Image: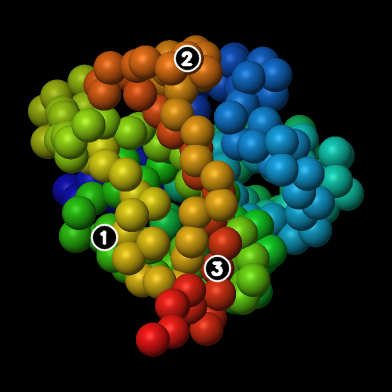
Amino acid sequence: MQQDKIFFTKEGDNWFKRNAYALNEETHSDAALSLIELYGLKPKKVLEIGASNGWRLEEIRSRYNAKCFGVEPSKEAVRDGKKRYPKVTLQRGLASNIPFKQKFNLVIINYVMHWIPREELLVSIKEADRMVADGGLLLIGDFAPDHPTRAPYHHLPKDNVCTFKIDYTKIFEATASYRVIAKLSFRHVDHALIPKVEGKDRGMIALLEKSNEGFYSHE
């Protein structure tokens, strides 16, 4: 079974069951929320890809009176989120096939890209780009190792599921349709902002701006 199908059919639910107890405690240390606040953003229409039960979107909605939408593979997470956060629109889906047609002035992909199977990576990037409005912002959080790293997923040792850790901002930057506004690194386990972190323990959060005209210099 393909890796994305594994998460859609079972492992998305399993992840949510393992982590649901801690989600509501994340707002005080969440790097994505901190970066939004640090740059004084006032998002009005937000999409989160890999939204879990929508806890982060609910926080954004309540802080900024934003219209918030999320896509998430776990049916358990979506069911829980619809009960807890009825003002957040959640739909079940994958990063490679996002079930929305409208565009958003802020799109969040936080610790999702490393799960995406490599055969679905470029179409998932295309889908994310499709969601970002011209002049809008893309917020990416993920691991930030010194070198591209592939590692087996310890919860599913028999299913050949892996994580793929690279700097995903570079893919978007390479199109010249995005430029990095801000980028912070931290210790993944507790999001501590410390100056030296080993590559295997390093996380990052980045804010990128999109322009359909592109960020080109003129000769």
Pointer 3: what residue?
210
Q: Are marks 3 and 2 in contact (CB under 8 Å)?
A: no
Q: Nearer the viewer, residue 101 or 168?
A: 168
Residue 6 image offset from top left, x and y in percent: 28, 43
Tell me if label 2 and label 1 are in contact, CB under 8 Å. Answer: no
Q: CA distance from mark 3 to mark 2?
A: 29 Å
Disc 3 residue type (three-letter): Lys
Q: Would you say 169 lies left or right of 194 here?
A: left
Task: Give me the residue at 15% from left, 28% from top.
Answer: 152
Disc 1 packing (10 Å; few <14; some 14–19; many ≥20): some
Q: CA distance from mark 2 to mark 1?
A: 34 Å
Disc sitting over residue 120 in the figure = 1
Pointer 2: residues within 10 angstroms few (<14), some, or many (20+)? few
In the depicted view, which residue is nearer to us: 195 or 139?
Answer: 195
Which callout, 2 or 1, points to the residue nearer the camera?
Answer: 2
The kind of secondary structure element at disc 2 is loop
Q: Is residue 193 visible?
A: yes
Residue at 61% in and 59% down: 137
Q: Amino acid at mark 1?
A: Glu
Q: Which residue is mark 2?
A: 194
